[in-house]
Amino acid sequence: MGIVVQKYGGSSVADANGIKRVAQRIVATKKAGHDVCVVVSAMGDTTDELLDLAEQVSPLPPGRELDMLVTAGERISMALLAMAIANLGQTARSFTGSQAGVITDSTHGRAKIIDVTPGRIETALVAGDIAIVAGFQGVSMDTKDITTLGRGGSDTTAVALAAALDAEVCEIYTDVDGIFTADPRIVRTARRIPRVSYEEMLEMCASGAKILHLRCVEYARRHNMPIHVRSSFSQRSGTWVTDSEERDPVEQAIISGVAHDRSEAKITVVGVPDKVGEAATIFEALAESGINIDMIVQNISAASTARTDISFTMPREDGQVAMTALSRLQGQVGYDRLLYDDRIGKVSLVGAGMRSHPGVTAKFFAALASAGVNIEMISTSEIRISVIIDEDLIDSAVTAAHRAFELDSDEVEAVVYGGTGR
Ligand code: ASP
Ligand code: MG
């Protein structure tokens, strides 16, 4: 039997009892004959609490020190977990990201993994030990400073290690039984998705599904590493994220799920002169400020004024920076004014089946209409339709779309076992 990489999220190791419970699970996997490498997140809300503390001592903490601070969270959980395993009579050794060979670039707070050289992990596994690795952290190749991969980055650590170790599977343990057709906190009758392709999962992550880190799915797709998302609180099978070829086409639903996102804001640049190069100027300024744009809509210019409105969405947390960057352009571009709206939400329908089924858009929009939801913006990919709507209507929109595509289960399948949802 081969190597299994297991990742346990913060809600699975929230307290001493959680750590003991997880330790038992790990030991059971080891006793079943696998070599086990475990990636662990910080306990409960530790990362948030550390960030709150940093904010109290400095309004703008240096990135290097912030990374040094928050990586301590994972160091606590990895050491405690190794102790709990030792108490069950197995040897476990904990390693920081740096010791585990997670090499990154030097962008503090959102470093990218450049290479994984897990020599020490392999040695530990060959010796019959269980290896425990601190999630979401690495070491910069250039500066040798400690880095972090961004919030939720332990998933990416797990997949990267699984790929480097040539593991059989990367199991991601969380507080729900897998990936559901909608957030079970909104739709109680959401259904567990047994299997989903990397492609659909990427679209779901980009549409606000927070269950997996987007970069971990990209990494898994590139290395063809199967991910099994499941609960650490139950023994049920969860959701397999794999290559689409591995799915039975008969089982294939048209729509895999409905995702939502409350983290975006919308800016409208009103009265942009309809001339060559204006849009380029606007979006260059935003790019220089490091802002990631999501949806863009440009209206047809009114014939009388030869002016047009351009609306776009981006992360709410970048709203202030974007407004500042754009207001500097007013003289140059000659637009009338800027509008900022952060009371918006995005609802997306994702499914590979929509490639070959006409009428999906019509059905989605009809469902929104009958729920009294007005559509402000629309964007699509081959396998996704997203709309921007009033933030207060997200729950109704998700519920209506979920029902229209007959995704509801007859019984309540989704149990949320833990987590504060923070
Ligand atoms: N502890 C980190 C966070 O809360 C990393 C993770 O949990 O994946 O973002
Ligand atoms: Mg997480």
Image (cartoon, rainbow, N blue to C red):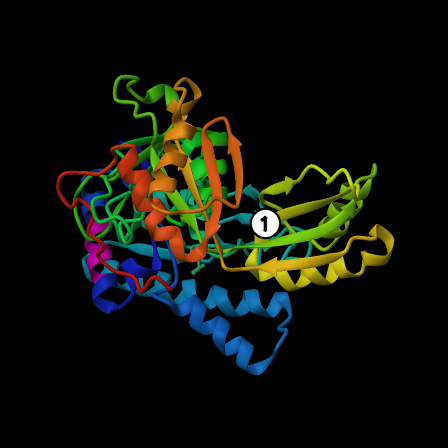
Inspect the image, locate mark 1, and give the three-letter code of the amino acid beneath it: Thr
Instruction: Based on the picture, tell me whether residue 376 belongs to the magenta stretch.
Output: no
User: Residue 26 vs residue 136: left or right?
Assistant: left
Q: Position of residue 286 (x, y in %)?
A: 72, 51
Quadrant hosting residue 359: top left
Q: Which residues are magenta?
A: 20-27
Q: Residue at x 44, y 47 (%)?
A: 208
Q: Is residue 418 above or below residue 31?
A: below
Q: Position of residue 125 (x, y in %)?
A: 35, 44
Q: Position of residue 185 (x, y in %)?
A: 28, 54
Quickly name the residue at label 1. 313
Q: Is residue 86 above or below residue 36?
A: below
Instruction: Based on the picture, tell me whether residue 22 belongs to the magenta stretch.
Output: yes
Q: Position of residue 57 (x, y in %)?
A: 57, 82
User: Residue 192 vs residue 381: left or right?
Assistant: left
Mark 1 nearby-residue class (10 Å; few <14, some 14–19, many ≥20)? many
Q: Is residue 16 above or below residue 286?
A: below
Visible residue check, residue 118: no
